[in-house]
Amino acid sequence: MNRDRGRFSVIASSMVLAAFSTQKVEAQAPPVLPSTRVLQAGPASLYPVISLRNVGTDSNVYNDGVAPKEDFTYSITPKLFAVVPIGGTRFVGQAAGDFIYFQTYKDQQSANGHFDGRYEVVDAKIRPFATASFASHRERQGREIDARARQSQTALTLGTDFELTAKTSLTGWGRRERIAWDERALYMGVPLAEQLNSTTDFLAAGARFRLTPLTSIITVAEIQRDRFETAPERDADSVRLAPTVEFENGAALSGQARVGYRIFRPLSPALEEYRGLVASAGLGYSIIDYTRVYADLGRDVKYSYDPLQPYYLESGLSFKVIQRIVGPFEAVAIGERWRLQHQRVGGTSFDGRQEDTTTVGWGVGFRISREMELTFTAERTRRTSTEPVRRGYERRRVLASISYGV
């Protein structure tokens, strides 16, 4: 039972990390399902989960370095995972909502939702697959934009795996993503839709090598094409070579890690290209049921809202360690450090604004049952910037969360 509990925590964490990853290797990764109790509805297997998260006080709800505002907040997050076998194929889907409440500053409240679905052929040498996703969020996007602005994302992927041997297969896919911001959304006086509405196309091909029943290496070459609707000076093409190590369900180490090389080439001659290391990882590690470690790291180029500094290099690491103390009681430690280095129009490599965001925290947890856990945490976040006007801030949060998967 203890081993099952640890495995549940690793799998659940891996799902969260994979859902928010910006890397596209997940387009052909096998789906990961929670190990909660399953409900049967005819041929469909359903995995419902609900969480009451971040119940407590936030000392700076606007991330304002001049006049911070404190408020009481909480969020309710229901999720439903479904697996439906259809002959020699299956559908795997995930739907989730997120309802965020603020007691005083009602403009910070939001209702968010997303859906991901994958339809695939199973148990065949040639296994075509298709994925589709849709998300609508009114919350902070990334570590640069502090406003809660509505953004919608849609994506469609078509691909196939071709099995050569029991341990080797070829894989390839094409993917299109579209990002659209609310036409009324402004940040620092900049219309976000005007600067950031875009369509991105991906084309990838490579091979998968299964080292063990739970570990695979995926070697893929990926071409990326970014096009902006009303800001063509931001258009860019990329080539990425980044092998991935993938740890599947049942391993002590779960999730995936990716390290490689990217050539990011803006079409505008006023912007310098980037050639260098990129990386991403969402990993969970469990030692039976006593120690659990979750880590998320990344390094890649991302687009900024600022028309004078249109992209930046983001790099950093966040982690969470949960250590069982005695009985159901656990100690929690949280750490995070991210750096953003902006590229100016007409400047040399990443000579623009530089920002560092650091979070440290601690807490206690109480494992009520295999499906339910209660945690209390206190954390402090601080951002410094080389352009200090309205960019630097401090924030303290004291929060409780409880999750339940029936």
Image: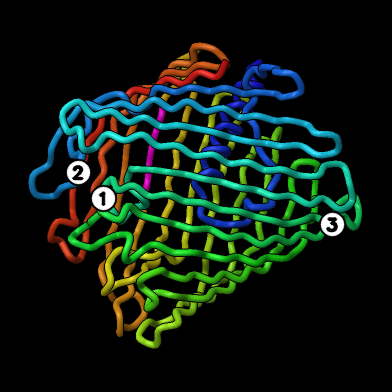
Residue under numbered circle 2: 62
Residue at image location 49% in from the left, 11% down from the top: 368
- In front: 4, or 43? 43
Left or right? Give the position of 311 relative to 225.
left
> For the N terminus, which image quadrant?
top right
- Whether tag 1 and tag 3 are in contact, CB under 8 A, the answer is no
Label ID, residue 188: none
Give the quarter of the image for residue 364: top left
- What amino acid does circle 3 point to? Phe
Q: How is the image coloured?
A: rainbow
Residue 94: x %, y % from top left: 58, 35
Label ID, residue 162: 3
> SS of the residue at dot 3?
strand
What is the spatial separation of the Cα atoms under label 1 and label 3, in whole angstroms?
44 Å
- What amino acid does circle 1 point to? Asp
Residue 324 falls inside the magenta stretch? no
Residue at image location 73% in from the left, 57% down from the top: 159
The part of the chain drawn in magenta is 332-336
Main secondary structure of the magenta stretch:
strand
- What amino acid does circle 2 point to? Tyr
What is the spatial separation of the Cα atoms under label 1 and label 2, in whole angstroms?
7 Å
Label ID, residue 146: 1
